[in-house]
Amino acid sequence: MIRLRTDFFAESLGMGTSMVVLMPQAAPGIGMEGADATGGPGGAPDGVPVLYLLHGLSDDCTIWERRTSIERYATEKGIAVVMPEVRRSFYTDEVVGEKYWTYVSEELPELVARTFHVSTAREDTFVAGLSMGGFGAFKLALNHPDRFAAAASLSGAIDLTTMDLTARDESMPARIWGSRDVTGTADDLVGLLGAADPQTLPALFLDCGTEDGLLEQNQRFIDAAERSSVDLTSRLRPGDHAWEFWDQGIQDVLDWLPIRGR
């Protein structure tokens, strides 16, 4: 794997930001078994498949590397991984702050496509995340189903209409949403699920621990998917809101992703 910590200016944010990118190599290295997604010396003609991997509320673009073996897992699958940084934005255009939804949904994929040899085809593009990042992954998938073949949420904060965000940060709801009610907006994932045409949605994977404080809202999302006949792969297994759970979860997500040629 080629690993890059990339610093750049984001126009939609009006400031510099960072991301970590993992790119497959034809020779993965001693002790590493890798799928050859590079297509040999000339590289894959259409670019390699890519997973956008999103962080949680208290984390940054380096956290998946520091808490899991994502580089090794991605090497085995021959997939690129893009890990952006969105601070504590809930992947939303903040009322008082920066336009992180515009950044992650519009500017970031365009920048990645211009800079790295990744495929831009829907069937090669995936998104996943944990906690706040699980919300971001499903938000991208439900608002832009034409762009993603699959999306996964690990212990996701995926029902903001019922969640008291002031428990973690008193000022956060006012900073992000102001006086807006998220019900019926791009941040209402359960509402989006009910309004969607199931045939147009990407494959969805939901994983949550039975001891996790977010269990109830994950169960509500599962129930909503059943009511709307949405094909959702879900599992509620023993575990808490912890990296031991997510380290196993991301391996299972990579096994589940419909990566072409695997």
Image (cartoon, rainbow, N blue to C red):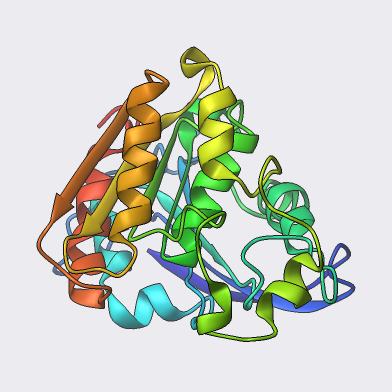
Q: Can I make out residue 96 in this image?
A: yes
Q: Can I make out residue 29 in this image?
A: no
Up-down relation of residue 214 to residue 201 (above or below):
below
Q: Quadrant of residue 36?
A: top left
Q: Quadrant of residue 205?
A: top left
**Measured from the top left, where is residue 30 in percent x and y?**
18, 69
In the image shown, does 260 or 137 lie closer to the viewer? 137
Up-down relation of residue 45 to residue 109 (above or below):
above
Quadrant for the C terminus in the image: top left
In the image shown, does 200 or 104 lie closer to the viewer? 200
The answer to whether 199 appears left or right of 92 in the picture is left
Number of labels in the image equals 0
Quadrant for the N terminus in the image: bottom left
**Which residue lies at the image location 30% right of the left edge and 27% below the top edge?**
261
In the image shown, does 161 or 106 lie closer to the viewer? 161
**Measured from the top left, where is residue 202 in percent x and y?**
46, 28
**Which residue lies at the image location 42% right of the left edge and 21% below the top edge?**
228
The answer to whether 111 appears left or right of 69 in the picture is right
**Measured from the top left, where is residue 21 in percent x and y?**
52, 65
**Which residue lies at the image location 32% right of the left edge and 66% below the top edge?**
71
**Measured from the top left, where is residue 194 in percent x and y?**
52, 27
In the image shown, does 230 or 120 lie closer to the viewer? 230
**Which residue lies at the image location 34% right of the left edge and 51% below the top edge?**
218
Up-down relation of residue 78 to residue 99 (above or below):
above
